[in-house]
Amino acid sequence: MKYFDLHCDTIVECAKQQKGLRANDLHIDIERGKTLEQYVQCFAVFIQDTIPEEEAFLFFEQKALLLRQECKKNKKNIRLCHEAGDLAKARKSGKMGAVLTIENGSALSGNLENLDRMAKLGVKMITLTWNGDNKIGTGAATDTKKGITPFGILALKKMERLGIVADISHASDYLFEDVAALSQKPIVASHSNSRKVFQHRRNLTDEQFEVICRKKGLVGLNFYKEFLRSEADEADMEDILRHAEHFLSLGGEDVVAMGSDFDGADMPKGIKGIESVGELYNLFLQKNYKESLVRKIFFENAESFFIRNNLL
């Protein structure tokens, strides 16, 4: 099977635990990824809200360079994708594709010029906030009734010029509304589930999902057990399917994708890591989903988005 995942925290965990990307005991490594027919993984540099904003850009840069080093060290098996055509090159050479992203716009350290450096390093997507507020706007965990800041408006406009996608996973409802109104290009929720299926402020409302559909964006299903159901410890793969099913009922056939949050979240029953996605794929088939649709959800929608928007 083919698998395209919009979000993981693996490269930050590799740095934290001093482990390599080739083989480890985390949720993702290259060796286990080899079992997939084709595999593209977005590697997010996750920046916690506790990291001072003035230090965040340096933190990002260090982790971005680590991903580059790991790809170079394992170049026979993985390709860092940062230019148009790179996905096709990874596919033709039978390599895993790695895409650099950022989780938390605090990485800019309040300086728009840092976006130029991010673009040169290959960043393709930035989750605008994490749970709290930053200089771009308000996060999902805040009760502040504000959305995007004046700096955030400038950042969003420059991101679009540079070909960096705005990711509204973790955004407050107010920030989502502002970004949806201001953005001229598609937006993405790289790792977000349905608030209708499970009422959690980190999940998307039906209206938000429909906005992303109209803007021809993407929504990656999040495997984090706390976002799947109220009894988190009972969550399993069936719950992931429930969120997918609801999004599909809203017309999301070309929008629903995968955004596991591997190495950044506790997984539901049945999900150990990248080696488990085949079982999830088979579960969709067992529930009588057409394989053509399952292929879209697990790979083709994400691949099409990045190629269609001339990102990779």
Image: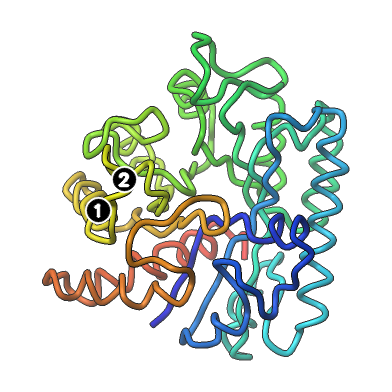
Q: Position of residue 105 (x, y in %)?
A: 69, 34
Q: Residue at x 80, y 67 (%)?
A: 68
Q: Residue furthest front?
A: 233
Could you give the CA–CA distance between mark 2 and mark 1, rounded to whole angstroms?
6 Å
Residue 25 disc label? none
Q: Position of residue 256 (x, y in %)?
A: 34, 55
Q: Is residue 256 left or right of residue 110?
A: left
Tell me, yes or no, whether the two marked residues, 2 and 1, touch with CB atoms within 8 Å: yes
Q: Residue at x 59, y 80 (%)?
A: 88
Q: Position of residue 104 (x, y in %)?
A: 66, 37
Residue wearing tag 2:
228
Q: Quadrant of residue 20?
A: bottom right
In the image, residue 266 above or below residue 51: below
* Colour setting: rainbow
Provide the secondary structure element on which disc 1 rests: helix
Q: Residue furthest top?
A: 145
Q: Residues within 10 Å of mark 2 (few under 14, many from 20)?
A: many
In the image, residue 55 above or below residue 65: above
Provide the secondary structure element on which disc 2 rests: loop
Q: Residues within 10 Å of mark 1 (few under 14, many from 20)?
A: many
Q: Residue at x 51, y 54 (%)?
A: 261
Report the amino acid beneath label 2. Leu
Q: Is residue 38 left or right of residue 85?
A: left
Which residue is more in the foreground, 12 or 296? 12
Q: Position of residue 200 (x, y in %)?
A: 34, 31
Q: Is residue 135 left or right of residue 170?
A: right
Q: Residue at x 77, y 32 (%)?
A: 51
Q: Earlier in the sequence, mark 2 or mark 1?
A: 2
Residue wearing tag 1:
239
Report the amino acid beneath label 1. Asp
Quadrant where the N terminus lies?
bottom left
Q: Quadrant of residue 41?
A: bottom right
